[in-house]
Image (spheres, rainbow, N blue to C red):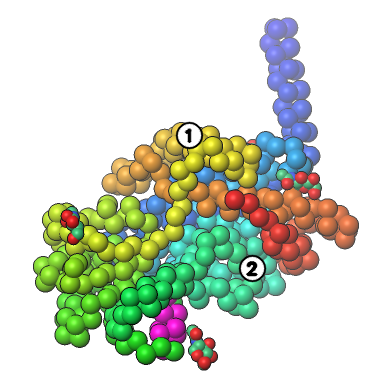
Amino acid sequence: MLAALAILLFLSSAIQFSAAKTDAITQLSVLVLVPYPDFNPNSGWSNGIELLPAARIAAREMNNRADILPGYNLSLVEASSDACGCITAPIGLSNFVRYAVNNKMCNQVIAVTGLVCSTVTEAVSPIAGRPEVDIIQLSLSISPLLRDTGKYRRLWHLLPSSTIFVHTTMSLIKHFSWNKITLLYSEANVLTESTTDAFIDILSNTTIQHEIIGIRSSPIFIHKALDLTEAESNRIIFASISSLDDLSHLMCEAFSRGLIWPCYAWIFQLLTYNEVLLLEQSFCTQDSLIQALNMSLILNYRLDNNKDNDVLVSGRTYGQFRKEYLDELQKIKSEDFVQDYLSGGYVINDNGNLYSNPMYDELWALGLAINSSLADMKRRGLSLNEYSYNNTPITNLIQEHLNDVKFN
Ligand SMILES: *[C@@H]1O[C@H](CO)[C@@H](O)[C@H](O)[C@H]1NC(C)=O
Ligand SMILES: *[C@@H]1O[C@H](CO)[C@@H](O)[C@H](O)[C@H]1NC(C)=O
Ligand SMILES: *[C@@H]1O[C@H](CO)[C@@H](O)[C@H](O)[C@H]1NC(C)=O
Ligand SMILES: *[C@@H]1O[C@H](CO)[C@@H](O)[C@H](O)[C@H]1NC(C)=O
């Protein structure tokens, strides 16, 4: 009896001790909005679950360090947004409202991160940044439209805009003195449409002939696009297609018509090269698809890092981070919400996804900016403990400091 009482006393004092300890720590909620698997054939990229481990590692690293955000703990609120390329973003919007705007469960979130898709960013961003919902957002979107700092006041980007692909293609056009080009793009998609608009803007100041063809997810559009290309004998084709299914369909058809290298030169703007190789071959054999894509130029961002010894912003090496990331990726498979997707046919790639790298950077950029703004806040009599969506001076300060965050 005495022993039991002693244990009880011990337990209760242990609980009190840990409660007292956490009391001193202010939780800073950060919303991580990434697309969870979407099995709709017309949907684009939806591998956001593979980015979550990177966000968790970054938050944990900062939480475990005494020299960054002392007294604060970054606490991630993870939620799904829509697959990239969808015309509307109902899931992203409702989760943004549920976990950020109307969040009754914890503190108001200090930032929205993730935002991998331009389509989702475009839907969510105009809401945040209003006086009553004044939240910083960090996005991996690349649509040129979203660079309008007047319209998207709180939106920060970790990747350059897709106009970089337009400039690359323009350099090729000039170098080889091409005088005719076809622009093929997915209609009603903010990313491909705005890249095409940027391209047209630049081309309209030149004498280069350009055919502009918008396509939709339907065999009719794909056939029509190729009919036109053939009729105009435009041999240089810049294709900005958001759905992998459409891309596979288009290139299988181009293969069967012989509209491929060396008679035709295809230039693609794609999210990642791997996705082309992983395309489903529902429209032709994989062999045909490989031949259709052979010698084409694929423009995308280099997100990997082959140098394991590179030191990251955290002070650890890329190799160390990468190992931990792959371990966490295996662990996340056992979580209930992931199990649901896995049993529905979703496959987590053992190598994860390279967008995990800029995802990790998003969290670190945010953490460093908040950390270095603390001194300024103190000087101005502000405190993060009073953070709310209508405390614009705090958001302004974090934003000012984000401007100064630089790391490799
Ligand atoms: C966090 O901010 C403090 C105070 O400005 C600074 O001394 C410290 O170096 C910062 N931490 C990091 C990791 O930059
Ligand atoms: C900090 O947040 C994480 C969630 O991101 C949580 O697991 C952890 O218990 C928190 N730590 C403290 C000291 O509040
Ligand atoms: C095209 O030329 C016009 C007039 O010279 C100029 O205002 C515009 O900025 C140019 N556009 C591009 C994309 O270079
Ligand atoms: C790709 O094209 C090149 C050049 O025409 C050729 O040498 C090579 O064999 C082709 N590869 C495939 C897989 O078709």
Tell me which residue sits at (14%, 54%) in the image: 287
Q: Element under label 2?
A: loop
Residue 145 picture location, percent across and down:
50, 76
Residue 154 image label = 2
Q: Which residues are magenta?
A: 195-204
Position of 17 with respect to 309 (left or right) is right
Residue farthest to the top, as pictured: 2
**In the rendered image, which quarter is residue 185 located in?**
bottom left
Ligand 1 under 8 Å from disc 2 Cβ: no
Position of 392 with respect to 301 (left or right) is right
Residue 367 picture location, percent across and down:
67, 50
Residue 109 picture location, percent across and down:
65, 56
Asked if 103 appears above or below 338 in the picture, the reply is: below
- Going from N to C along the chain, the mark reached first, 2 or 1, is 2
Residue 132 image label = none
Q: Residues within 10 Å of mark 1 (few under 14, many from 20)?
A: few
Residue under circle 1?
323
Q: Dominant secondary structure of the magenta stretch? A: helix
